[in-house]
Image (spheres, rainbow, N blue to C red):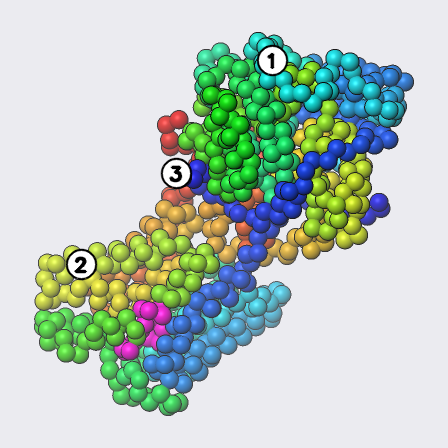
Amino acid sequence: MAVVKTFPMGGVHPPENKFTADSAIQILDPPDEVAILLGQHIGAPAEAVVQKGDTVKVGTLIGEGKAFISANVHSSVSGTVKRVDEALDAAGFRKPAVVISVEGDEWEERIDRSPELVTEINTPAEEIVQRIKAAGIVGMGGAAFPTNVKYMVPEGKQVDTLVINGVECEPYLTADHRLMLEHTDEVLIGVEVLRRALQVERAVIGIELNKSDAIEIMSKHAERFPHIEVYGLKVQYPQGAEKQLIKAILDREVPGGKLPLDVGCVVNNVGTALAAYHEIQKNRPLIDRVVTVTGSSLSKRGNFQVRIGTPFSHAIEAAGGMPGDVAKVIAGGPMMGKAVPDLNVSVTKGTSGILLLNKREAQREETVACIRCSKCVSACPIGLEPYLLEKLARMEYWEQSDEHDVLDCIECGSCSYICPSNRPLLDYIKLGKVKVHEMRRASAG
Amino acid sequence: MSQTLIVSGSPHAKSDLTVRSIMWGVVIALLPVFAVSAYVFGVRAIIAVLVTSAACVVTEYIVQRFFLKQKPTVDDGSAVVTGMLLAFNVSVAVPLWQLVVGSIVAIAVAKMAFGGIGTNPFNPALIGRAFMTVSFPVHMNTWVVPRESLLSLGVDRATGATPLGYIADAAARGEPLSTVAAELPGYSQMFLGTIGGSMGEISALAVLIGGAYMLYRKLISWETPVVFLGTLAAGTGIFWIIDPTAYADPLFHVLAGGAMLGAWFMATDMTTSPMSRNGKIVFAAGCGLITAVIRLFGGFPEGVTYAILLMNAFVPLIDNKFRPRRFGKGVAS
C-alpha cells in the first residue's frame, strides 16, 4: 500500500470509542408526536405550508424554502398537524416548527418503498439539482448546508471533482460507517447521481482506516463505477473536515474565507449521497436519517434510522433509556457536537448522533495558567495560534484577532482538546469570530 | 426526565494531558541523569538534588501562599523540575546553603516575580545558576574527581577540572591542545559520564535516555535538541577543520559540558522557548551558535547557560516573526 493519505498539519487523535460500529441499523418506530423544525439547515427557515388540523402523510411538503439558501421540509410521519408553532432547537432556542400527532404510517403514493435497487439513472443534471432542492436535501454530516446550492456553480468557476466524505472522524459516531456497510450500492448510486448533477468526470470517496470493512466493500462495489475512486485515510481528527479532506485526497488547499468551489471541488457526505439516491431513484424526500445513539453507560446503544422531528428522549428510550449518571447530552459527536439543554429537542437532518456523557466525562477540569507548551499551535489544522487568539479575545483586541486570522478557525476543537491547562481556547476563539464579524459589519455599513 | 443537563461549548472531550503529567514526566526523564550523578559523585549528589528540589518547592509555596495570596500550585511539579535542573547544572562541591540561595533566586526572582508558571521569560534554573556563578565563583568552579569519596558529606577541596576547563586553560596559555591531551577523558568516558563536571551534565547517555522518554511522551519536539547540537557541532567543526591542533573536534563539544543537558532539558523548556516549529528551530540554532562562540572565543570555558538565557530574551521576537504557516496561504492552489 502506498503512503497513507492525510492532511499535513495539526490534528489530534482522541479515543475513538466507536462502541456501535458492529450494530446494524435498527428502524425506530415513529413517536406519538414529532416537532419538525422549519429551520434545520443553514440559511433562511422554510415557510410553513400547512395549518393546524391539516392531514399529512410521510413525504408531504410542510415547509417551503423560498430564499436562495434555504431548504424544503417534509413531514416524516402521517397524522394531523397539531400546531404550527415553536419548538426547542438543539441550542435551546425556540424556533418555528410544525408539530404533528402521529396516526398510522401512511406514505405519499409517489414514494417507491420497495427494497429493489434502482441502478439506472435517467434524470438529467439540471433536474437532479432541482429535485435535490425539492426533496429538502441538506448536508448530512452535521453542517446541514442546502445541497442544491453547492451544485449551482457560479459563472467562471471550474469544478472537476466531487469529494464524498465517509471519514466520520468524530469519536463515537458510526452512522456513516453503517450506511456504507449496509447501503453500499445505494450510496454509490447516490454518489453517481451527484457526480452527474455536478457534471464532473471524477468522484472520490474518503474513508478513515478505522473502517477497513467499509473501505473494502465500498472499493469492491465501486469497481462497477468507472468514475468513482475510494481512498483510505489516516485516523487523525479532523480528517473529515472539508478543507482537510480535500487536502488529504486532492492535495489542494482551500484558503481562509474561500470555498471548496474555489479549488475546483464540491464536498458532500455519504449520508447526503444516500439521500440523493432516495429522492432521484425512489422519489423519497428527506424524511429520516441514521443516528448513532451512544454513550458509555447506555445499555442498548446502537444506530437507528430515525424520523426527522423525533424527540431525543424517544431515541434514548429505544437505546435502553436514560442512565442515571448522565450529565450531558450531545447532538452530534464529542468534538463538534452541541450540548442540548433538554431531552425534548428533536432530531434534525443534521443530527448524526445522540451522545450521552456521564458526570466524569462531562466535567471540565479547572483552568490553570498557560505554560506555553505549544500543543495548541501544533494541533491546529489551520496553522493558527489558539493560545494567542484566546489572549486577544480576553483582552477584547478584536482588530488583532482579525489580523491573526481568527475567522479562519474551523472550530474543530483540537486546541481545547489537547490543552494541558484546560483552557477554554475554542470558547474564546468563537467569541472572537462573532466580535470580528460584528466589527467588520459595523465598518462596512 | 427532570435531570439537569450541563450545557457548554464544544469540544466535549479532553485529552489526558495536564500540566502535572507534563512536569512529572520531565521529572521521570531526569531520573537516569540523577542516577548517574549519584553513581559518579556519591551521597552528596543525592543530598544536593533533594535540597534544591525541596528549596524550590518551599520557596514557591511561600511566595504563592503569603506574598501573592494565591492557591499554591506546587503539586504541578514544575518547581521540582527547576530544583533538579539547578542541582544538575552545578558542581557537587557547592555547599548546601549556596544551593538554597540559588533555588530561592531561581523560583522567587526568575519565576514568581514574573507571575509564576508560564510567565517567566528566562529559564529559572539557569538564572539560579548564573546568579550562583557570579556570587559563589570559588565553589562553582571547584570540580570533584569522579568516583572518589562517594560517601563524604563535606565539601571536597581537591579536584580535577572539566574537559572544557582543560582546553580553555590550554587556549589561555596559547598552547596547542596536545599539551592537555593526557588530561582529557576518552569519548566513551564522556558518553557514559565518568568525568568531572556539573552533577547532571556528565553523562550523554543518561541525557539521551531521558530525552528519548520525553520524545516518546511528546513532551519535547526533536527539532530543538537536534538543531541545537547540530549548530554547535557545525560552528565548532569549522574551526576544528581549519586548525585541529588549536581547536577541539565537534564530537568533543557535543559531549562536553552542559551541551547535552542544555539541548535536551533546558532549551526545550516550554515556557521559555518559542511556540511554532520554525521558531523552535531558529531558537535552537541561536543557542548552538552562541554556545560555540562563547566556548571558542569567550572568557568562560562553557557557554550553554548564557546561550540559552540570551535566546530566551529573543523568544517574544521569534514568536512574532516565525508564525505557523496558515493553511491555504503560501501555496499555489
Residue found 64% across the figure and 57% down from its top: A366
Judge if badges 1 and 2 mark residues of a common chain: no
Q: CA distance from mark 1 to mark 2?
A: 69 Å
Location of residue B277 with respect to B294 vertically, above or below: above
Q: Nearer the viewer, residue A262 or A436?
A: A262
Q: Are marks 1 and 3 on the same chain?
A: yes
Q: What is the three-letter code of the residue carrying label 2?
A: Gly
In percent of the image, x 80 and y 32: which residue is there? A29
Q: CA distance from mark 1 to mark 3?
A: 36 Å
In the image, residue B117 above or below residue B281: below
- Tell me which amino acid carries mark 3: Ala
Q: Chain of mark 3?
A: A
Prevailing SS of the magenta stretch:
loop
- The residue indicated by pointer 1 is A128
Q: State the residue position of label 2.
A: B237
**Residue B33, which numbered label?**
none
On the rendered image, what quadrant is the C terminus of chain A found in? top right
